[in-house]
Image (cartoon, grey):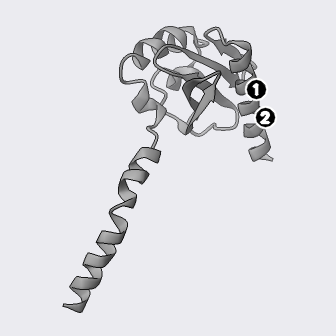
Amino acid sequence: MKRLLSAALAAALCTPALPALAQDFLPHISDIVKKQPYRNLWQKNVCQKRPKIPANNWVCSAQGVAETDKVRIGGTEYYQVTVMQPRNVTYNYIHVLMNRKTVVGWHINKDTGQNRVYGQPTDAEKQVLQQMETEFRARLQ
């Protein structure tokens, strides 16, 4: 009986925290780009524009190691994502800013030297993409 009460008390104490945890969860970019309108934006602005080499086949599905967050730029909310090629995370990756209306990104491929800008980032978006690259490089040190 004592164990049952302890378990019930623990469940009651933890339950209010569950909705807060659910709100903090951000989906993986590969799940984001499966849904509209993100799917069309990703296909048109990233997948079709990527350098057509085997090392970039992972880009269309966004199936890579990813760090996802949310950021506000000029009052507009974006997913802020760095997605990296599986098994080559420090040499082939994309910094992405996307919302329901736009996707912009900076693809860096240190293996081939074929870097690419996706979409038409504003000056503020370019600044955030550059900051993402600076922070990414700093974490690798």
The front one of 26 and 76 is 76
Residue at horizontal 58%, vertical 13%? 50
Q: Position of residue 139 (x, y in %)?
A: 75, 46
User: Tag 2: residue type?
Assistant: Thr
Query: Does residue 65 lie above or below 116 as drawn?
Result: below
Which secondary structure, mark 2?
helix
Residue 125 located left or right of residue 46: right
Residue at horizontal 66%, vertical 29%? 92
The front one of 54 and 27 is 27
Which secondary structure, mark 1?
helix
Query: Does residue 108 lie above or below 22 as drawn?
Result: above
In the rendered view of the protein, which quadrant contains the N terminus?
A: bottom left
Q: Position of residue 87 (x, y in %)?
A: 59, 40
User: Tag 1: residue type?
Assistant: Gln
Q: How many discs mark residues in the rendered view?
A: 2
Residue at horizontal 61%, vertical 10%? 119
Q: Position of residue 16 (x, y in %)?
A: 35, 61
Res. 82 visible in picture: no
Cβ atoms at labels 1 and 2 below 8 Å apart:
yes
Q: Position of residue 90 (x, y in %)?
A: 69, 37
Res. 20 visible in picture: yes
Residue at which label 2 appears: 134
Residue 68 located left or right of residue 135: left
Residue at which label 1 appears: 130
**Numbered label attached to residue 104:** none
